[in-house]
Structures are given as structure tokens and as C-alpha cells.
Image (tube, helix red, strand yellow):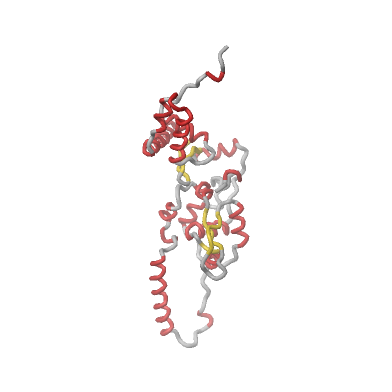
Amino acid sequence: MSNPEKVKLPLASSLQQVVGALLFGADHPLTVEEIRTCLKSVAEQEGEESETASLFAEASPREISDAIESIAKELSRLELGVEVAEIGGGFRYQTQPSCGRWVRNLLKQDRPNTLSRPALETLAIIAYRQPVAKSEIEAIRGVSVDHVVKALMELHLIRIVGRSELPGRPFLYGTTASFLNHFGLSSLKELNELDPTLQRSKPSERKAAHTRKKKSDRDAVEETPLFAARDEATPDAAPEPTDAVKEILGDNESADAEPVFEEKEREEV
């Protein structure tokens, strides 16, 4: 009777085959560097006994990227309802959005939970202007956001990224890796592509804008009558979210919206 320990399984015949298996078995989006590390680790464990493992360990980042791209093209050609998506700088398999209604039915999921409008607006401000203090969010929205910020932190969509230089050194908030994962973004740069006007300006630009504002304020003071009618003064309204923000964060009233939240253990930063 043969020793089970001496039975060898067949080895993968291509780098694409190995990369495909790694993407399938991973519990989070894999980066190219993580795949390279795995290939090298296996080669070290196998030693000189496996030329195939040693060959895969020499794969360059470009070769791994080409393997991922090849897998994505093959899945698209076969129309299997599965695709490769780049999320937060890594890659993963996911079902195609067009098949979402059947997948939800199979998993016995009702209409997916979505964020409320106040939560979406607060999250949009943080995403575009991070790092941002709570006082700045409240100045933009015109209302208190304490409970909304707390809820977003509990959902692992935002986190504390530092402290402001303002008096009291309030916390600064930013988005997490789970934010990119939930909304299908490869990086925060995609937000700029949707609406560059919402992104926080550079310090030099803010200084120039501040100088222009001071000059315009002085001119306005010189032209403003000493006594102004009260009914002419109207408070500034809180800005409405733009179409770009609504597009990336989703329509809260849409019945076909994709799930926003996943299991807690997969939302760790």
C-alpha cells in the first residue's frame, strides 16, 4: 500500500491558472504584489524539487497583470456571469451586476439595505474633502452630523485619520478600504474623474482664493449702504449633492440598487 504522503498532485500548467485560483480562493481583493509574494513563498517551500514553482516565482508584475487581464477577457468572452474587478488596488472575482436579481433571490436577500440621504450626503463630503473635520461637514450640510458620523464609523466606511490644527485639535475623518470595496472603486482618484470641482483644493489654491475673497469683501464693504434692509439678507442654503455624487453613491430610492453593506468580518480596514 502506497504512502499517502508521497502522492503528488499535478502542478498547474500556466501562470494564468495559478493566478485564477488565487483570486478565487482569496477572501479579499488581491494586489499584484500579494500574488508575487505567494508565488515566491511556494517556490521557497518546494525548493529545487519543483522547477514549475521556481518558474512561477520569477514572474514579473507585468506578467501577473497580463495574466489577470487575460482571465478577465476570457470570462467576458464566455459570458459566465462572473467578472474580474479592480477594487482598492486589488483584484477579485464578482458576479456581474446584470445577474444581481437572481443572485439575491438565491441567497434569500430582500431589497438591499441602503444608506439614508443624510448619510449619503455626509459620506460624499468626507470622500471628496478628506481629511475633513466634523465642523467642516456641519458647515457644508448645515446640520449636526454626530449620529451620522458615528453610524458610518460603525459600518467601517469612514475612520479617524488624524487631528486638525484648529483649536481643540478635532478629529479628521477619511474613508476606508471598505468604502472603495462597497462602491466598486479602484482608488479615490476615480472620484476626481466624476466631479473634479468637489475635490479639496491645494494649499496654494486656497491661499489665492482667500486673497481674492478678502479683496472682494473689501470692495463689497465700500459699496454696501450703512443700513441694509433686513428682508434682503437671506441665509445660505446647504448645497445639494451633485449628479456625480449621486452617481457614485447610488440612488437611495432605486429598487435595483446593488448591496451597499457586506458581512462585518469582511469590512475590516
Residue 74 placed where, x, y %? 41, 32
- Name the residue: 48% across, 30% down: 45
* Residue found at the far bottom of this picture: 226
Residue 219 vertical placement versus 237 (above, below)? below
Residue 130 placed where, x, y %? 49, 59
Residue 140 placed where, x, y %? 52, 66
- Which residue is more in the foreground, 240 or 26? 26
- Name the residue: 60% across, 51% down: 155
Which quarter of the figure has residue 208? bottom left
User: How many numbered discs, if any?
Assistant: 0
- Which residue is more in the foreground, 267 or 55? 55
Residue 140 vertical placement versus 189 (above, below)? below
Which quarter of the figure has residue 110? top right
- Name the residue: 55% across, 52% down: 157
Q: Residue 103 vs residue 69: left or right?
A: right
- Name the residue: 55% across, 71% down: 167
Residue 163 vertical placement versus 60 (above, below)? below
- Which residue is more in the foreground, 30 or 95? 30
- Which residue is more in the foreground, 191 or 165? 165
Residue 188 placed where, x, y %? 45, 52
**Quadrant for the N terminus in the image:** top right
